[in-house]
Amino acid sequence: MKCKYLVSLCMPFAVLANEPIQEENWGVGIGIRSASMPFKTNGNTVNDVVPLLFYQGDNVYLEGASGGIHFYQSDTFSLGFAAGLRFFDIPRYAQNTIQGSQIDVGGRVTWHYSPKLDISLDLMSDNDGRIYSNLTTDYRIDGEGWDVSLYATLRAKSARFNDTYYGLQMEDIGSAIDTQFGVKGRTQIYRNLYAVGHLGATVFDHDTYSSQVIDSHAQFEGYLGFAMFGSSPANSSPQLPDGSYFRLASGVATQSGPTEIIRLKNDTDPDRNQLTSVFYGHPLAGSVFGWPLDFYLTPGYVYHHSSDVQGSFDEYVLAIKAYYTFDWSVRTRLGFAEGISYSTKISHIEAKNMEEKGYQPSKLMNYLDFSLDVNVGDIFSNAKLDNLWVGYSLHHRSGIFTTSSAFGRIKGGSDYNSLYLQWHF
């Protein structure tokens, strides 16, 4: 899968840099997804843990497990790229080997008939060029502290797509059209904390249902989770961080996990595989739950250097990061980020970790970043350097303890200790 297939991960930094700050339109959370399996197999349902990222700007948007970029917008029409996580609901024991859940990408056209009603048409593809198209009507309603979206979709599936994901490459079903409908929304629990959820169904067409491997007319899915959003109706004037930032880091792989590193026990990779990364930080909020937390939407590019045991390759990250600042004589910050990472190749240390545990590695993984930095201006008593920070970060990829088919049902991953400079502007 090339970078062009990962619009939500590879968005140009310049697109975000030109975004207006809309602090009320972002969030980060986690949900538990449950779906029925339509196939003739043991078991009825399969469950996943799903990281959720939300953001709504003029050009870039994230909607839980999907997102995209608008290239053109008007009051009545928008056009752009779209990307979304599509789950392949098969028995859990087969998901690591097959890894059919993946990010699909394509283009989307949306007609805005009113502030509450949109009709969109998209053309999507998986990483092997199996295409399908969705014609969707979406109607939104909202109240104080809650909002709901009702949708209905006609999905036209190509023969290759239908034969792979519903014929399981054992039967030629051919192209077909199925129907999807459902409801998704959120409701406020306390201040910035919301419950988020989705309930939907796919009603199969006659040819798909008649397949020898399908035993249900419909498939049901839904998720329920919690998310923290940047502000709530009760917040009248939320604070914002001061400006954006760029972070340049260099790191080396470690055989230790996050808990060991926090306890200052580090076992450096004997092959000393290294990475260099650059991250952009787009300010979102400077106060959540009344706490002095600075939040940023942060896309990043990571270059993995070649070594005696691996060739060079690229990694793309999209995350939301929070900082808490200790207002000491030398200002000190703790940082934590949650997001997703797509690596064009599997690093040597990650492949070794997976092989030892008997897993097939996954290019798409959950991403975490832990950091500690100090203000350079305070160190040298130089106000001209107040916008510069120097620090340590842990670059972490993992599969959330086998809880998600999106990340290959993997336990473990890779970690890199890094040092960085971060400039706010």
Image: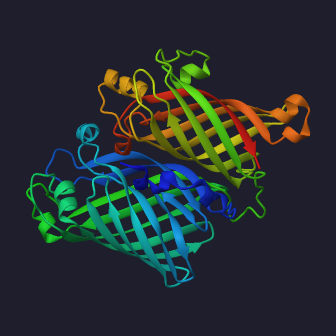
Q: Residue at x 9, y 64 (%)?
A: 210
Residues 156 and 106: in front is: 106
Image vertical order of residue 258 relative to residue 176, above or below: above
Is the residue 78 above or below the residue 363 in the image? below
Residue 392 in the figure: left or right of residue 357: right
Left or right of 252 on screen, residue 103: left
Q: Position of residue 419 (x, y in %)?
A: 65, 28
Q: Nearer the viewer, residue 341 or 44?
A: 341
Residue 183 position within the rendered picture, expressed as x and y whole percent measured from the top left: 42, 68
Q: Quadrant of residue 276?
A: top right
The image position of residue 142, as x and y in percent, is: 56, 73
Query: As displayed, is residue 373 above or below residue 309?
Result: below
* One can see residue 65 in this view: no
Residue positioned 52% across, 15% down in the render:
267
Residue 77 in view: yes
Q: Which residue is drawn at the image coordinates 71% and 39% (left, top)?
A: 422
Left or right? Give the position of 129 relative to 62: left
User: Toward the viewer: 235 or 246?
Assistant: 246
Percent coordinates x, y for residue 343 in the rendering:
43, 40
Colouring convention used in this rendered image of the protein: rainbow
Residue in the image at 34% along x and 68% along y:
123
- Counting the numbered discs, the total is 0
Residue 369, picture quadrant = top right
